[in-house]
Amino acid sequence: MRVLIIGAGTGGLCLAHGLKKAGVDVALFERDRTPRSMLIGYRVGISPDGSKALHSCLPPDVFAEFVRTTARPATRINMRTEKYKELLVADIPQARNPAHRENSVSRIAMRTALLNGLEDVVRFDKTFTHFSRNDDGTVTAFFDDGTSETGDVLVGADGAQSKVRKQYLPHAKVVDSGITTIAAKLPLTPENAKLLPPQADGAVTLLYGPKGAFVIIHVMRFEDASVEDDYIMWGYAASHDKFPDLKGMSQEQLKQVVLDMTPKFHPNLRELFRLGDPETAFQIKVRTSEPVQPWESSNVTMIGDSVHLMTPGRGIGANTALRDAELLTRKLTEAHHGKDVVQAISEYEREMIEYGFAAVQSSREQMDGNGAIHKPVIGRVVLAFLRTFLRVTNALPPLKRRMMARDMADRDHVDSAHEVVHAG
Ligand SMILES: Cc1cc2nc3c(=O)[nH]c(=O)nc-3n(C[C@H](O)[C@H](O)[C@H](O)COP(=O)(O)OP(=O)(O)OC[C@H]3O[C@@H](n4cnc5c(N)ncnc54)[C@H](O)[C@@H]3O)c2cc1C
């Protein structure tokens, strides 16, 4: 059996490893010209589920390399107002084993690590255009350089703008979430660290401001200094209507937009915005997808954002792509050992559609530009209610622990409470 994968992102690379390890003939095609071409975004949080999927698909030396490139995992969730006032600070349950714990990684470092061992599998500078089915049951993928490749199975792992999805499921809808995000990073120097909100070092920090404005801060400290220089990453989000027209703006202007929109935010936070390296600034209009009714399975399928694009709201997009990769590896391995291929893919799709779109829904609830918190009058009431709820929970440790356990279980499909120990 020969499997063609389109897209060397989070899901595609994990799947390629899983299939190669199982002895399946696999070829992966990526449109980027080089492994280090710009990837949107910097940091990805790999949840315990995502780590388990990687551990299961990657050969041990590649998994060890992935772990080596991670930053220190966040041990706290740190929720505050835009003026740095505490709302809720709680420990994130930690597992010691990297194969079962939260891992914080830069996208580029993760891609570099996952490319190890796939030198004979991945081909860069190959932009997929379309596929066709052949009379002998095989499928052919075509590329914009005029070449083509034929295999028994085609997997679209080509992300948010998937060409595989557009051809295979033309009715599947990708929609605007109503949220715009501007993000940038700056070096983690002792001076810059002083500007961070209290307890932000070692935490995932979420700041809730007025009019639905929201800031996320990650502090990336690498255990291995050769991986990357330590950095601070911030992302500012609000509903589209709060932003000026961003079309054609330079990266420096994007930063200025954030400063113009946050005159009353904590001065140190504004300084972090100001110090963001303009070369790293980017903006995205966050999109999501609508549930797709199950379709008749064939030897073409999809994983990750290509099929269930979701907002970064719960930090589960990459983790769901990894879960798909692990599940599809298992099913295609069964096919490799004699099971009917379409039956194997149908079993994968039945499960994937259910958990994938549940994840889409849950991440949309966290990032919905039409939500009440973004509305003029009711928004103030909702924000006041949210802040009170967080402060009360913060003051009641049993409630706080329950909330954290529920949140972790929501993010991952398996409640791994039995295998975690609290940080510190
Ligand atoms: C700012 C930001 C922060 C995020 N933070 C988190 C987080 O903390 N945790 C989390 O779980 N998720 C996070 N996500 C989501 C996560 O990054 C994605 O859900 C995940 O990368 C999806 O993996 P994928 O393999 O489906 O697609 P991708 O990783 O996007 O990979 C798709 C690949 O396909 C290639 N490609 C596209 N079209 C073609 C073509 N025609 N031919 C050949 N190749 C093609 C692309 O170049 C790319 O390499 C975040 C996303 C963003 C934008």
Image (spheres, helix red, strand yellow):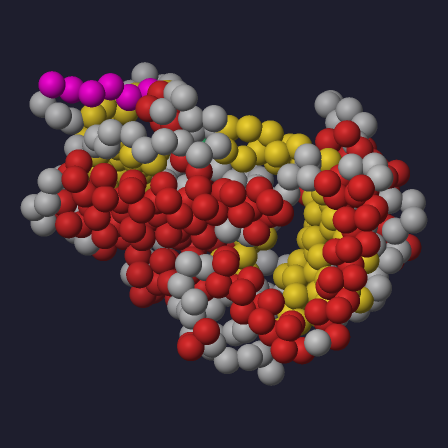
- Residue 86: percent from left, percent from top: 80, 66
Q: Is residue 150 above or below residue 132?
A: below
Q: Specify the quadrant of the image occupied by residue 349.
A: top left
Q: Is residue 412 magenta?
A: no
- Which residue is found at the position 54% from the left and 69% from the top? 405
- Which residue is found at the position 54% from the left and 57% from the top? 45
Name the side, left or right, on which 166 lies relative to 241: left
- Which residue is found at the position 73% from the left and 63% from the top? 390
Q: Is residue 234 above or below residue 398?
A: above
- Residue 104: percent from left, percent from top: 55, 61
Q: Nearer the viewer, residue 285 or 376?
A: 376
Q: Which residues are magenta?
A: 130-135
- Which residue is found at the position 83% from the left and 46% from the top? 380
Magenta: main secondary structure equals strand
Q: Is residue 17 above or below residue 310?
A: below
Q: Is residue 134 magenta?
A: yes
Q: Is residue 223 visible?
A: no
Q: Is residue 217 visible?
A: yes
Name the side, left or right, on which 156 lies relative to 263: left
- Name, please, the residue furthest toward the bottom: 424
- Residue 285: percent from left, percent from top: 64, 32
Quadrant position of the C terminus in the picture: bottom right
Q: Is residue 30 above or below residue 400?
A: above
